[in-house]
Amino acid sequence: MNAIVQEGQRVAVPLRLRSAVVLGMASLIGLMMIGWPLLLEADPTQRVDPPFLFLGMLPVILAVVLAEISEGGMDARVLAILGVLTAVNAVLRGVSAGTAGLELVFFLLILGGRVFGPGFGFVLGCTSLFASALMTAGVGPWLPFQMLVAGWVGMFAGLLPRRVTGRWEIVMLVVYGVLAAYGYGLLMNLWGWPFILGIQVPGQDATDLSYAPGAPLLENLHRFLVYTLLTSTGGWDTGRAITNALAIAVLGPAVLTTLRRAARRARVERR
């Protein structure tokens, strides 16, 4: 499907069928890589190692997805908007630094995805987390997962119903910002859980909340939920949710107006 919708109008980052399929497959692979402790049926008598091979593959998969999404050639004006929002998000994350969950990067990501669509939202999530990691020296094995999950936050913001406008749009975005904050924390905790608390090995010390190979799914799920509740949900994730809600409620109307004015000047139409 051509990116041109009408004469003189283009979508920000068009998601063609092939791009959507690639994005869906990459998302499924990424979700499996994040949730492997709950999906893997491991033998408790055998050594279990995290999927380091997949860890190295994820940046490659993300690169393929981003190349596929921008295959049709990104308009210079859209690229400029993406660059500006990425830079602003990187600075906002550097300023807030995630202290007590006070992260300002997500509210602009959600509003950008809302205005410019799911493809733009996914790319903005990836570039924002990558740029901010470079600025804050936060590059590590967790970065590809942060980029992927942030991309999902922007993408699903772009998939929210378009018919909702005015005050109810802000309410919808506030609710989504709260859910996205907890969802981001939950997925990132799931990724880091076996690395931080370790994997139970017979004859070795481990905590009661460590990943237990071979244990029933519900037991490992219970261990993980208690872990994330104690370490994140009641603190960092709640701080992030409150920050998202306040930022969207207070700044959302003005930022949405500004972004939509920029979209009109760039002759960008969201689909």
Image: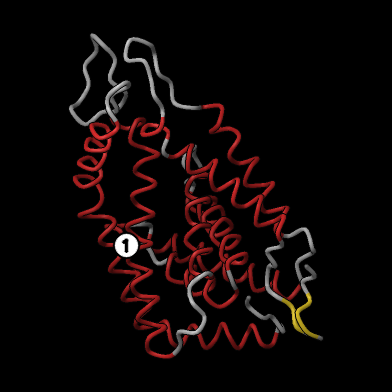
Q: How many other residues sit within 10 Å of disc 1, few (<14), some (14-19) or many (≥20)? A: many
**Picture quadrant where residue 123 is located:** bottom right
Q: Which colour scheme is used?
A: secondary structure
Helix, strand or loop at disc 1?
helix
Instruction: Reply above or below: 34 against 51.
Output: below
Classify the position of the N terminus by image quarter: bottom right
Residue appearing at x 52%, y 80% in the figure: 162
Pinpoint residue 37: horizontal percent, then vertical percent: 37, 31
Residue appearing at x 59%, y 51% in the figure: 24
Please give the residue where the numbered disc 1 appears in the rendered image.
Answer: 240
Pinpoint residue 95: horizontal percent, then vertical percent: 41, 63
Instruction: Reply above or below: 252 against 148.
Output: below
Pinpoint residue 222: horizontal percent, then vertical percent: 22, 38
Instruction: Reply above or below: 46 against 29.
Output: above
Residue appearing at x 63%, y 42% in the figure: 61
Amino acid type, residue under disc 1 in the picture: Arg
**Picture quadrant where residue 184 is located:** bottom left
- Asked whether, in this view, residue 51 is left or right of residue 43, the answer is right
Total label count? 1
Foreground residue among 238 and 128: 238
